[in-house]
Image (cartoon, helix red, strand yellow):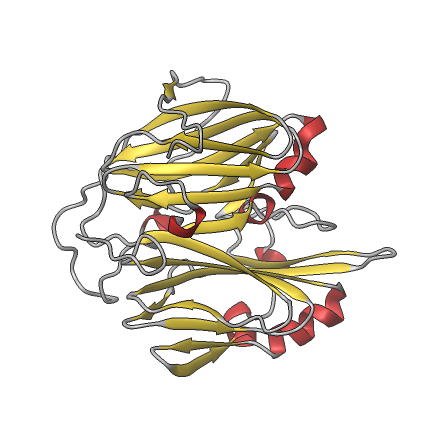
């Protein structure tokens, strides 16, 4: 790790009454649990109902890598927020976010989450930001509310081509449910010979965010995609995404669409599988094609590709 600076400290903050911290939403809290639907919990809830804040100031030069050590585990991140300065918001959106679970090596190959930072917060180039249950905005902060459990330690890494200035804020709860999987995420972008997104592991698909060139491009992208569970075709992406309901487009939404017209029309669709995550026992794969981008989020018994959880 000598080749990268590592921020070893974290700053705990007193709760600020002027900055409300929403309670951990029960609709999201069940997403990491890998037990079969309807099966009893292994033991009473192990995650504290109280959350603790932590904050990391960021001021980075162009072509920089920042690595932050998160509060010690066992712990569950209940909200991850980025507060960029207005002048560096575009640079934050274009940066790369990597999260590493139960490991102290910031090598990108060991990251369990590896996504363009803006997409992790529902912000795609040329589209209005998402406003939904799992990702959205709180004032000037971008927020991701997917639960992120880890048992010993966690690293947050940001790689940026342009200067960054702002803050990273966490809300965490002490403890991890015994059957909790690790939060995982990756992005598929069309390129020659791009293969499917997936993993050989046990887990649950938690969400999709698809972006394409205009509504017609998005429709073709969705129609041409499918989900494979344990090696067998399970559902089409059209079935998973469903038809966006105009009444389901506010901050509490679990699915929806966003569009932008103009010289470069863009369109996006998302679905957070709250209440009905798609379970897999051995593997899953999302097969897509076309000139588009797909963010795939899931929970796995593996903290990173090819690495067992050791639980």
Of 246 and 129, nearer the camera is 129
Q: Is residue 126 visible?
A: yes
Horizontal relation, residue 57 to residue 289: left or right: left
The percent coordinates of residue 304 (x first, y second) are: 35, 54
- The residue lying toward the viewer, choosing from 123 and 59, is 59
Pick the residue in front: 294 or 267: 294
Residue 14 picture quarter: top left
Is residue 94 found left or right of 5 in the rendered image? Answer: right
User: At 72% across and 70% down in the image, what residue appears?
Assistant: 217
Q: How many marks can you see?
A: 0
From the viewer's perspective, is 260 left or right of 204?
Answer: right
The x, y position of residue 93, in whole percent, is 63, 41
As drawn, which residue projects farthest toward the front? 2
Image coordinates of residue 145 in percent, x first then y, are: 44, 43
Q: Residue at x 40, y 59 (%)?
A: 298
Q: Position of residue 246 (x, y in %)?
A: 64, 59
Left or right of residue 69, residue 136 in this image: right
Q: Work out which residue is located at the far bottom of the displayed protein and give it.
A: 232
The N terminus appears in which quarter of the rendering? Answer: top left
On screen, residue 172 above or below 34:
above
Residue 139 in sight from this viewpoint: no
Q: Is residue 37 above or below residue 175?
A: below
Q: Nearer the viewer, residue 102 or 21?
A: 102
- What residue appears at the point 65 percent right and 25 percent down from the top-left corner? 85
Q: Residue furthest right?
A: 263
């Amino acid at each position: 790790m000598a080749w990268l600076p590592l921020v070893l400290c974290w700053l705990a903050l007193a709760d600020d009454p002027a900055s409300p911290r929403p309670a951990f939403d029960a609709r999201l809290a069940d997403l990491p649990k890998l037990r079969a639907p309807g099966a009893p919990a292994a033991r009473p809830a192990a995650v504290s109902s109280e959350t603790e804040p932590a904050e990391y100031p960021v001021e980075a030069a162009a072509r920089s890598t920042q690595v932050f050590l998160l509060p010690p585990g066992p712990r569950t991140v209940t909200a991850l927020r980025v507060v960029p300065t207005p002048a560096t918001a575009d640079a934050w959106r274009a940066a790369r976010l990597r999260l590493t679970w139960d490991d102290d090596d910031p090598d990108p190959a060991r990251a369990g989450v590896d996504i363009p930072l803006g997409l992790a917060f529902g912000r795609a180039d040329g589209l209005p930001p998402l406003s939904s249950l799992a990702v959205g905005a709180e004032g000037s902060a971008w927020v991701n509310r997917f639960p992120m459990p880890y048992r010993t330690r966690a690293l947050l890494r940001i790689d940026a081509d342009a200067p960054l200035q702002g803050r990273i804020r966490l809300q965490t709860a002490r403890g991890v449910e015994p059957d909790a999987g690790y939060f995982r995420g990756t992005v598929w972008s069309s390129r020659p010979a791009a293969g499917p997104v997936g993993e050989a592991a046990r887990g649950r698909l938690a969400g999709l965010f698809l972006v394409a060139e205009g509504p017609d491009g998005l429709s073709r992208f969705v129609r041409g995609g499918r989900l494979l569970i344990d090696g067998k075709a399970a559902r089409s992406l059209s079935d998973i995404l469903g038809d966006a309901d105009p009444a389901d487009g506010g901050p509490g939404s679990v699915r929806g669409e966003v569009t932008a017209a103009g010289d470069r029309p863009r369109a996006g669709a998302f679905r957070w599988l709250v209440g009905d995550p798609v379970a897999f026992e051995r593997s899953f794969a999302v097969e897509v094609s076309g000139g588009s981008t797909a963010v795939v989020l899931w929970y796995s018994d593996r903290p990173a590709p090819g690495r067992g959880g050791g639980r």
